[in-house]
Amino acid sequence: MINIILFGAPGAGKGTQANKLIEKYQLVHLSTGDLLRSEIAKKTDLGIAAKKVIDRGELVPDEVVIGMIDRKLEEHKNSNGFIFDGFPRTTPQAVALDRLLADRKKPILAMIALLVEEEELIKRLLNRGKDSGRTDDQELSIIENRIKVYTNETAPLAEYYTSKNKYVGIKGVGSIDDIFGRISDTIDKLK
Ligand code: ATP
Ligand code: MG
């Protein structure tokens, strides 16, 4: 069982690396950002409410994303493991994840953090905004707010997992394959 939290600021490359990791290790990708965007596309009540928050660069309420993760864990009960991408993003989310995984006897192997400096993050996100159509990537002030929210609410989770001896930081700059190699080496040593 390989359960990995891919961690990092907006634009750190979590989604890109998650897609490669699920192939290599046969894991299920759980991205709360992707799940929320799918609700937005379907124009569900949840999606309509989430879009307002996401377009300001703020976080969706904890109970909403925790509920989504709970349902997905249940749906993929027999998987080899999960890549958590964009979750947990707050301390209450991390505490809830601990409980959800403890109930199912599926511990976290590691939190792998992709380390990228702010200037590079902003460059990547503005670039993605040009062709992805993601409304939260199109305006500098929104991107800056997301980075601020990340610094204040999400970055402290690095200490939470360090205290459990689960935190590994990885250089998130370079070619996609080089970064993937670094992540795979880390997983292979731990598994
Ligand atoms: P990356 O580019 O590294 O994949 P990102 O931050 O640009 O990361 P997503 O993870 O897709 O993009 O998240 C997009 C938005 O969805 C967030 O800014 C936030 O509003 C909302 N969101 C996603 N996950 C959560 C979560 N766990 N808790 C609260 N809000 C979330
Ligand atoms: Mg993403």
Image: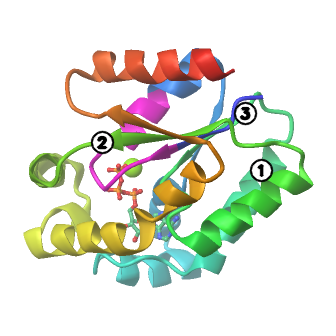
Q: Position of residue 153 (x, y in %)?
A: 42, 73
Residue in the picture at 70% in, 30% down:
2
Q: Quadrant of the C terminus?
A: top right
Image point (57%, 22%), residue name: 187
Q: Amino acid at mark 3?
A: Gly
Magenta stretch, residue numbers: 6-19
Assign a secondary structure to mark 2: strand
| Quadrant assignment, res 16 | top left
Q: Position of residue 100 (x, y in %)?
A: 80, 59
14 and 130: which one is in front? 14
Pointer 2 and pointer 1: residues touching (CB < 8 Å)?
no
Q: Which residue is mark 2?
A: 115
Q: Is 55 situated left or right of 35 in this image?
A: left
The magenta stretch spans residue 52: no
Which callout, 2 or 1, points at the residue further toward the start of the chain?
1
Residue beneath label 1, please? 73
Residue mark closest to the camera, 3 vs 2: 2
Inter-mark Cα distance, 3 to 1: 10 Å
**Which of the 4 image quarters holds residue 166?**
top right
> Is the residue under label 1 in contact with that under label 3 (CB below 8 Å)?
no
Residue 179 point in image, percent of width and height: 33, 23
